[in-house]
Image (cartoon, grey):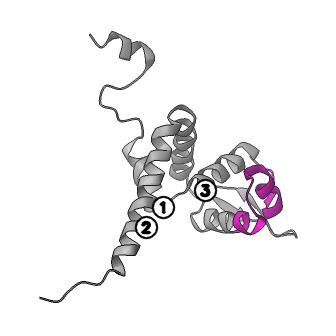
């Protein structure tokens, strides 16, 4: 028993996202567009990315792409370039972060459903917590 799982590479525990990657996704509250932006920049290597170019690749508005690029810069994943227009390049601040982003690409390509479920569970929890903050409670 378990031979089929061993042949397909499926873990019997159901864990497909390493703990350090899970923590990174949750801690940074990554969205699917964040992940897609990371993967675009990562695949582009030394290419520069501005908001309109990223927007075209991700099918989002330029304003949303600009926010994504700024977020990636704040996370230490990308760095701004000095040349106009404002553009960014993939440049993880540490080797550990680069390895984590490699793991993200691998997990996203092999376990898309698991990664997106994790992302959406964080989004759902955040929305629930935000709504709960505005719920009126009767004082005892």
> Compared with residue 126, is residue 120 higher up or lower down, i.e. above or below?
above
Q: Which type of secondary structure does the marked residue at label 2 adopt?
A: helix
Cα–Cα gap, marks 2 and 3: 18 Å
Q: Is residue 33 left or right of residue 135?
A: right
Q: Which type of secondary structure does the marked residue at label 3 adopt?
A: helix
Which residue is more in the foreground, 51 or 84?
Answer: 51
The rendered magenta stretch, by its main secondary structure, is classed as helix
Residue position marked by numbered label 1 in the rendering: 29
Dot 2 alpha-carbon crowd within 10 angstroms: few under 14, some 14 to 19, many 20 or more:
few
Q: Which mark is residue 34?
A: 3
* Quadrant of the image occupied by residue 19: top left
**Residue farthest toward the bottom in the current orientation of the protein:** 139
Residue position marked by numbered label 2 in the rendering: 127
Residue at 77% over, 56% down:
54
> Compared with residue 63, is residue 105 higher up or lower down, i.e. above or below?
above
Cα–Cα gap, marks 1 and 2: 12 Å
Residues shaded magenta: 47-66
> Compared with residue 45, is residue 125 higher up or lower down, i.e. above or below?
below
> Could you tell me residue 11's position as x and y percent?
35, 26
């Amino acid at each position: 028993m378990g031979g089929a799982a061993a042949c397909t590479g499926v873990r019997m525990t159901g864990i497909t996202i390493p703990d350090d990657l899970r923590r990174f996704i949750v801690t940074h509250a990554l969205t699917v567009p964040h992940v897609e932006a990371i993967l675009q920049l990562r695949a582009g290597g030394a290419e520069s990315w501005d908001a309109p170019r990223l927007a075209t690749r991700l099918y989002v508005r330029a304003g949303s792409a600009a926010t994504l690029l700024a977020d990636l810069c704040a996370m230490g994943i990308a760095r701004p370039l000095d040349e106009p227009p404002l553009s960014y390049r993939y440049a993880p601040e540490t080797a550990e972060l680069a390895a984590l982003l490699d793991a993200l690409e691998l997990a996203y390509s092999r376990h898309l459903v698991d990664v997106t479920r994790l992302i959406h569970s964080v989004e759902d929890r955040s929305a629930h917590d935000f709504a709960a903050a505005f719920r009126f409670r009767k004082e005892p």
